C-alpha cells in the first residue's frame, strides 16, 4: 500500500514538472512602429511589430497634464491580443507637436499571448491640432 501511494505521488510530481516545463514562456524582443489617432477616451491605431505582425491598438487614457496613465489592447491580425497598462508623460515640443513617452507593463493576453508578461516603451510624436501621431515601441514580451 505504501509503495503504491509513493509511486502515485512520484508520478504526480513528475507529471506536474513535465507540464510546467512544456508551458515555460519564451522571452523575445518586441519592436515595432505605429500610427495613432486621438479619440475622446484615448487613442486608436495600427502598426506592425515583431512576433505579432500587423496589429491594431485601442488605448483608454487618463490625462492629468503632463502625466498620462491607462491601458492598451494590441490585437494581431488573427485576433490574438496583448493587454498592457501604462504610465508616462506628455512633453510639448513646439509648433503644436507633443512627445508622448509611455512605460507599458504587459499583463496578459489571449490566444498565443495568454499569460504573457514583459514590458515595452512607446515614444510617439503627436500633432496637437489634428490628434494624429507616429511612434515606435521597444521592449520584451514573454509568452
Image (cartoon, rainbow, N blue to C red):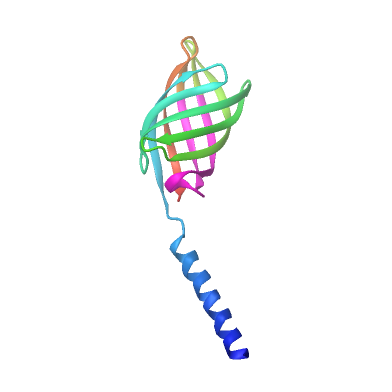
Left or right side of 43 for 49: left
Which of 80/88 is in front? 80
Q: Measured from the top left, where is residue 6 in percent x and y?
A: 59, 85
Q: Measured from the top left, where is residue 136 in percent x and y?
A: 41, 31
Please check the rendered image and state whether residue 120 is part of the magenta-colored stretch, yes or no. Answer: yes
Q: Residue furthest front?
A: 1
Left or right side of 3 for 53: left
Which of 120/109 is in front? 109
**Residue 47, above or below 53:** above
Q: Residue at 52%, 29% (x, y): give it.
A: 101
Q: Residue at 58%, 25% (x, y): give it.
A: 61
Q: Residue at 59%, 30% (x, y): give it.
A: 70
Instruction: Decide whether the magenta segment is chiefly helix, strand or loop.
Output: strand
Which of 67/6 is in front? 6
Q: Measured from the top left, where is residue 68 in percent x and y?
A: 60, 26
Start-end of magenta stretch: 100-124
**Residue 99, above or below 107:** above
Which of 81/61 is in front? 81
Q: Residue furthest right?
A: 64
**Residue 104, above or below 9:** above
Q: Residue at 56%, 26% (x, y): give it.
A: 60
Q: Measured from the top left, where is residue 115 in percent x and y?
A: 51, 50
Please check the rendered image and state whether residue 20 is part of the magenta-colored stretch, yes or no. Answer: no
Amino acid at each position: 500500500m505504501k509503495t503504491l501511494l509513493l509511486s502515485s505521488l512520484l508520478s504526480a510530481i513528475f507529471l506536474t514538472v513535465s507540464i510546467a516545463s512544456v508551458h515555460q514562456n519564451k522571452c523575445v524582443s518586441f519592436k515595432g512602429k505605429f500610427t495613432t489617432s486621438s479619440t475622446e477616451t484615448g487613442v486608436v491605431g495600427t502598426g506592425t511589430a515583431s512576433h505579432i505582425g500587423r496589429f491594431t491598438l485601442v488605448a483608454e487614457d487618463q490625462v492629468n497634464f503632463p502625466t498620462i496613465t491607462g491601458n492598451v489592447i494590441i490585437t494581431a491580425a488573427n485576433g490574438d491580443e496583448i493587454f498592457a497598462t501604462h504610465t508616462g508623460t506628455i512633453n510639448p515640443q513646439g509648433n503644436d507637436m507633443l512627445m508622448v513617452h509611455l512605460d507599458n507593463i504587459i499583463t496578459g493576453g489571449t490566444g498565443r499571448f495568454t499569460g504573457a508578461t514583459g514590458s515595452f516603451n512607446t515614444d510617439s510624436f503627436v500633432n496637437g491640432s489634428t490628434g494624429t501621431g507616429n511612434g515606435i515601441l521597444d521592449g520584451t514580451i514573454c509568452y
